[in-house]
Image (tube, rainbow, N blue to C red):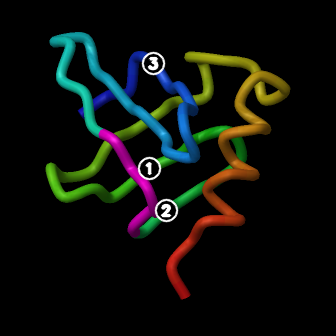
Amino acid sequence: MEVRALAMQDGALWVSNHRKVQQQLERPGRVLRLGPWLALQTPRGWWHLFEDQAPLEQLQPYYQWLWLNRQR
């Protein structure tokens, strides 16, 4: 699924797609990042955010959240 919106609220990351499907992530699963491209593995499958969807500066807080809350 392609990510259309990201939001952080109460320590969790919310992702939604163009069909208004939302998913809350308290801790990220697998995360693949190559430059500004991002793929998140969630219980509902993989969500993708492509480099032309948002500038890197806008995505930096989300990248930091994913790094700090990753499962080890």
In x, y percent, where is residue 53?
56, 16
Q: Residue at x 67, y 51 (%)?
A: 65
Say few, some or many: other residues with alpha carbon within 10 Å of mark 2 (under 14 / 14 to 19 / 20 or more): some
Q: What is the secondary structure assignment of the residue under circle 1?
A: strand
In x, y percent, where is residue 69?
61, 66
Q: Which residue is mark 2?
A: 31
Q: Residue at x 46, y 63 (%)?
A: 27
Q: Residue at x 39, y 67 (%)?
A: 29
Drawn side of residue 5 relative to residue 55, left or right: left
Question: Which quarter of the figure has residue 70?
Answer: bottom right
* Magenta part of the chain: 24-29
Which residue type carries mark 1? Ala
Q: Can residue 27 be found in the magenta stretch? A: yes
Q: Which residue is mark 1?
A: 39
Which residue type carries mark 3? Ala
Question: Which quarter of the figure has residue 52?
Answer: top right
Disc 2 + disc 1, Cβ < 8 Å: yes
Q: Nearer the viewer, mark 1 or mark 3?
A: 3
Q: Which residue is mark 3?
A: 5
Which is nearer the N-term, disc 1 or disc 3? 3
